[in-house]
Image (tube, helix red, strand yellow):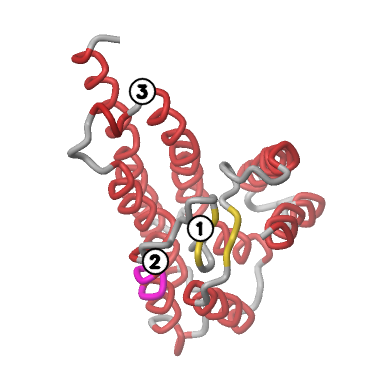
Amino acid sequence: MSPRLGQAAAWAVHVYTASGAVLAMLALVAVLDRDYRLAFAWLSLQVFVDATDGWLARAVDVHRRLPHFSGAHLDDIVDYLTYVFVPALMVWHAPLVPEGWRLVTPAAMLLTSAYGFSRLDAKTSDHFFTGWPSYWNVLVLYLLMWQATPGFNTVVLLTHAVLVLVPLRYVYPSRTPVLMPLTVVLGFTWGVALLVALWRWNDVPSWVLWYALVFPAYYYGLS
């Protein structure tokens, strides 16, 4: 690949990553319209972008071709918008928590995750996250699917806000060398189950609700 073509490919990968910010805006608009199903559809598309942009970046060697530009910083900005900010807005807007906790709970999510994203050891060289990795989009989806009580939601959300600050290590699912084949298979089938849940939003089958707990249980156990 020629140097010019290689640089063009590297910039294309960064634009692909940055497209997640546009998806975050579309999800935010859907939340304000109270169309939470559509909001999660946009967030799901961003998860796909997030899961594939790293592979593309390594394929075209973006670090060597664009050494002055940090794809990692760009990725963190997009991830904070989609994994933290939009779900926090959803907690406030739905609302998923009691009236007296509508500001406190999203604020805890935003502040602790801002700290977590700013840690220099947020992602370790052996493919772990330090502290709970702010999967708020997934957690809020579960609370909506299960239609849990506001009090229960508050406890779950604030507990995970604390876990962001606790320096335990959590597996980086797409890069861990431990049990990778099993992780990929369970992760893929889990993703399919969540897509079924989005499709059947107003009538999610009970088997989907229960199967959707398998991969999170496996993830916490593996971590």
Where are the magenta residues, as a range? 111-115
User: Which is closer to the viewer, label 1 or label 3?
Assistant: 3
> Furthest residue to the bottom?
100
Residue behind mark 2: 89
Q: Estimate the x, y position of residue 47 in percent, counting from the top left.
A: 49, 43
> Furthest residue to the right?
207
Is residue 144 shown left or right of residue 90?
right
Residue behind mark 3: 60
If the image is split into quadrants, where does the C terminus sit? bottom right
Inspect the image, locate mark 2, and give the three-letter code of the amino acid beneath it.
Leu
Compare marks 3 and 2 and give the one earlier in the sequence: 3
Question: SS class of the residue under badge 2?
Answer: helix
Q: Estimate the x, y position of residue 25 in percent, counting from the top left.
A: 31, 49
Q: Estimate the x, y position of residue 169 in percent, counting from the top left.
A: 57, 64
Residue 92 position (above or below residue 172)? below
Compare marks 1 and 3 and give the one earlier in the sequence: 3
Compare marks 1 and 2 and give the one earlier in the sequence: 2
Mark 2 crowdedness (10 Å alpha carbons): few <14, some 14-19, many ≥20: some
Q: Estimate the x, y position of residue 34 in percent, counting from the top left.
A: 44, 59
Question: SS class of the residue under badge 3?
Answer: helix
Inspect the image, locate mark 1, and give the three-letter code of the amino acid beneath it.
Asn
Q: Are marks 1 and 2 in contact (CB under 8 Å)?
A: no
The residue shown at (52%, 77%) is 166
